[in-house]
Image: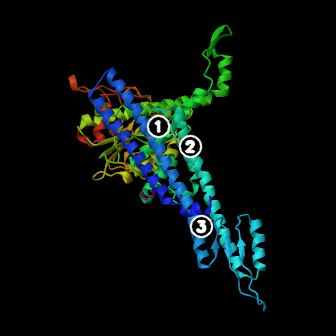
Amino acid sequence: MDLATLKQLKPSEFEEAADGYRATSDMASAAKDHLDNVVAAGMRKSLKGQALEAALGELKNLSADFHYAQIECGLVSTALNGFAHDIDAARKKLLSALDDAQAQKLTVNADGSVTYPDGPAKDGSESPAKGGTVSGATDPAVQGIARQSAHFDPNPHHAEALDIADRITAALKEATEADDKWAPKIRALKADDDLTVSNQDLKDAQSDMAGVRDAAKNYLDSMAAPPHDGSPQQNADWWKGLTPEEREAYLSLHPDVVGRLDGLPSETRDEANRIVLDEKQAEYQLRIDSMPKPPVNEWTWISAGGWASKVHTDEWMEWDKKYGDEYRHLQSSLKGMNAIRTRFDQTGEGGLPEAYLLAFSPEGHGRAVVATGNPDTAQNQAVYVPGTTSNLGKIGGDIDRMTELWRQTQQATPNASVSTITWLGYDAPQDIVKDSPFEHYAYDGAPAYRQFMDGLDVSHSGAGEPHRTAIGHSYGTTLIGAAAQTGHLNADDVIFAGSPGVKVGSAEEMDVPKGHVWNEEADGDPVPDIGRWGHGGSQWKLGGGTFIIPSDDIFGAHQMNTDAEGSGASATTGAEGHSQYWNKGSTALKNQALVVVGEYGDVTAPQ
């Protein structure tokens, strides 16, 4: 970049263009939300049939277009602001050098060289020290030679001019590098000429994000960074302290960071995590599509000792060795992502409120936190922790449980302000025999659960303090117990279902008001009995070797009925075994809903 161009360049014009793209991104986001949460939701309330499904399909495609526009326009806005930041820094250095040249009566030429006048005569000479013209350099070796020459020149203006010339050259080089860096990044931010958002489009958007993020390092470094291991309040304070442009930069370039910060508004986290979901789902789908599929002939029979045995074929074993682990991870993760999208698509069905994706990562066994209803405005919040074998691939069932609980709260108290949250924010034991006996899964996950609960307080914007219920199933109850044992749980009520033990010996140790610990044990649920007989490390042991679990009277929890009750149209069904506590219309679900909305007097106890 030459001197005249940089001097006349106006970074503010690029910032104004960035504002325009940011406004477009915001409009696209608002249009997407309106389609998903108003138009489509309204149609689901009143229409049925094939026509509805066809219309919803078209709306879904249009919503995807708006979301893609939101992502790309956000990146363009951030890229333009990043370029303006870098070019403005170079321009300020140039203008500073030009101002100093004018003050020292030096002439700056069009090519960036500097002409200096004659200097005073020295050492009795009648002739003045001759003036001249110097060019700047950025190479240290070249600079050293030039400075040595200026040092021996009797004309003091030589050294002054050389300093100015070096500063001008450095500013022009910095501007050229910024232009060379940003030009290809910004040119790459363009979409196909169709209205279909493909997996490849979203993969390209992910690549665009990485490219802009790399180029914007200096721009991001100029902002306040998110707190390292910050509390929810520190996270919220950081976010509030950013300008709209800086928030756009972090949402565009680090949605994974913004999406996992407890204490930030739920709408902000949802926006960030949906970007991650879109791009990861596209990436995973493209990856699995490019892999060799498992052989159709997976099994064969062999004769061993006169008995026929079913074994994997050699062909399948070879495939499994090369691709099996990755294929299963991709397949399981995609199943979970589709389940989350299914919940998005249910908004409006039977009055179901919109969903909020408050955390998401497909790494490892996966993480996902999904809320039915906005917890920031809800007066009643329920945070459910699933148990053993929980992972992203199975998140659909856990989301369904909280969907049914939300619906039941509306039966218990019509129009109650409720948000029910599925919290898969920890590595759950994946094997009942090999993993679930160990307590470290609970203690490792407890801090994150407490942090999330604290974050709900910080981000809450409704009137008054929300009523918060911690709900655990199976090993999830153990995590909640560990969270209460090792810190502040920040809950008003606790509900255990099918608990093997919770690390404490009484309800009074659960860090909630006295009388606000509730427990359910369904007929035929083997897990509480396993806890009673001392399986693993999740129970609290009384002297003499007796294990205490929440289902025992000595623990002190309110035991809630799980059996069928009533008759006729209002009758409820019972829960049996370990997995029916959230069955639609069950007594177990009804009692949980009553606790969540604070209608304690209507909770029924076992006969």
Q: Are marks 3 and 2 in contact (CB under 8 Å)?
A: no
**Residue 237 included in the magenta stretch of the image:** yes
Cα gap from disc 3 to disc 2, whole angstroms:
29 Å
In this rendered view, identify the residue nearer to me: 249 or 560: 249
**From which residue to which does the magenta span run?**
234-238
* Disc 1 target residue: 475
User: Circle 2 — which element?
Assistant: loop
Please state, as top left, top right, bottom left or bottom right, where the N terminus lies in the image.
bottom right
Which residue, given by chain and number where applicable, does mark 3 sit on?
94
Q: Position of residue 480 (x, y in %)?
A: 43, 44
Which of the two discs, 3 and 2, labels the residue nearer the N terminus? 3
Which residue ends up furthest to the left in the rendered image?
Answer: 568
Percent from the top left, x then y, of residue 512? 35, 49
Question: Does residue 247 appear in the picture of this structure?
Answer: no
Disc 1 vs disc 2: Cβ atoms closer than 8 Å?
Answer: no
Measure the alpha-carbon separation of dots 1 and 3: 64 Å
Amino acid type of the residue that numbered disc 1 sits on in the rendered structure: Tyr
Tell me the amino acid under the disc marked 3. Leu
Cα distance in 3D space between marks 1 and 2: 48 Å
- At 67% from the left and 70% from the top, the residue drawn is 165
Residue furthest to the bottom in view is 124
Indicate the amino acid at tag 2: Ala
**Position of residue 315 in the picture relative to residue 57 (left or right):** right
Which quarter of the figure has residue 414?
top left
Q: Which residue is mark 2?
A: 188
Label 2, residues with CA under 10 Å away: few <14, some 14-19, many ≥20: some
Q: Which residue is drawn at the image coordinates 27% and 38% (left, top)?
A: 594
Say which of 299 and 361 sits in front. Answer: 361
Q: Is residue 353 magenta?
A: no
Secondary structure that dominates the magenta span: helix
Give the number of the mark in front: 1 or 2: 2
Residue 106 in sight here: yes
